[in-house]
Image: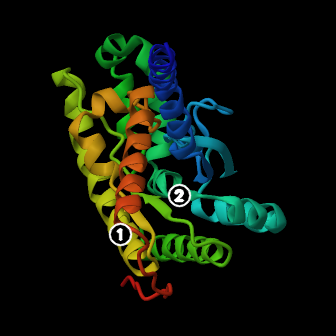
Amino acid sequence: MKIYRFSIILVFILILNTLAAPFAFAKNASITKPKLNIVALGDSITFGYPPPSTTAFPDLISGARKVVKFGGSGATSSQLLAAINSNPKEFKASIKRADVITINIGSNDFMQATGVATLFSKLQPLVSNLEENLANGKVAEAINNTPLTPLTPQQLQQYTTNLVTIIETIKKHTKAPILLYNLYNPIVISSNEILNQFLGPLHTFVEGNVTVVNSIIQQVGDVSGAHVIDAYSTFKTNPAAYIIPFDIHPTPAGHQALATLADSKLQSLKKGGKEGKRDIGIGISFR
């Protein structure tokens, strides 16, 4: 009888252990799942469009618990730096609590300096009746009457200085990884052959300037220890899916792609451990 009772008790214990195992696993899984405090620096790509938004790419990074943003819609690198300097205590406190920092800045520097922003403001109202506005010449008029000028050495140097200063300021207060996004070409080639007569040269103009800016971003990342995130190559694979037509802003799929790039980099850093950092020096010159 005692053996029989002992057997029943043993079976009962085994059943309880079996039932409890999934719950124990779930509890352990929830403990190991990363919960990230993110500080995101940038323009409307970071803040979402139209702002405010909680569905921009920093908000979509896996494990995002709290996202604090600095900059704002339309911000250039100079304006981002001014936003940081205007509230140093809040910035310092946020950076100290951050598990990861993202920087996505430079699109407005480029767009405003070259005239592309002015051109987009003229083209956007024409999109709703695109075929008609192609036929009546309004698209051609907008493009032909908006001069575009390449970025100057002075503008490139100012952007470089701003970017270096922003990263230096961050690194004074944290050793958290800095994810520095490069720029993508927002000109999406159309299936409309007539429209592409205008978009083709515009795409080429933008491509040349974006390539120069991305070279700066890569150099600053290499010297500073910031991790350059290659938005350019990712968006180039499917620009129509990732970019709103006649607009620099990402689609929801584009924001998710930017977040996925961050996820991949953070996962690789977790596997690879800490990396050594070098001091930033402004050693990039333009002639």
Q: Quadrant of the C terminus?
A: bottom left
> What's under tag 1, amino acid-wise?
Gln
Earlier in the chain: of badge 1 and badge 2, it is: 2
Q: Is residue 140 visible?
A: no
- Give the left or right position of residue 82, taking residue 279 as reference: right
Q: Counting other residues with Cα less than 10 Å from the Cα at mark 2, is it few (<14), some (14-19), or many (20 or more)?
A: many
**In the depicted structure, whether residue 184 falls above or below residue 49:** below
Q: Residue 224: horizontal and vertical position, in percent?
A: 46, 78
Q: Quadrant of residue 52?
A: top right
Q: Which mark is residue 246?
A: none
Task: Return the residue nearer the eye: 248 or 12.
Answer: 12
Dot 2 lies on which element? strand
- Write the residue at 59% across / 78% down: 168
Q: Nearer the viewer, residue 118 or 281?
A: 281
Residue sitting at the far left: 193
Label 1: how many residues lie within 10 Å, few (<14), some (14-19) or many (20+)?
Answer: some
Q: Name the residue tied to disc 2.
A: 103
Q: Position of residue 284 (x, y in %)?
A: 40, 84
Vertical relation: 52 (above or below) 87? above
Q: Tell me where residue 79 appears, x and y as whole percent.
A: 67, 60
Label drawn at residue 218: 1
Vertical relation: 109 (above or below) 48: below
Does residue 246 appear anywhere in the picture? yes
Given the image, on which type of amino acid does mark 2 rest?
Ile
Spot occupied by residue 261 in the image (x, y as percentages of width and height): 37, 47
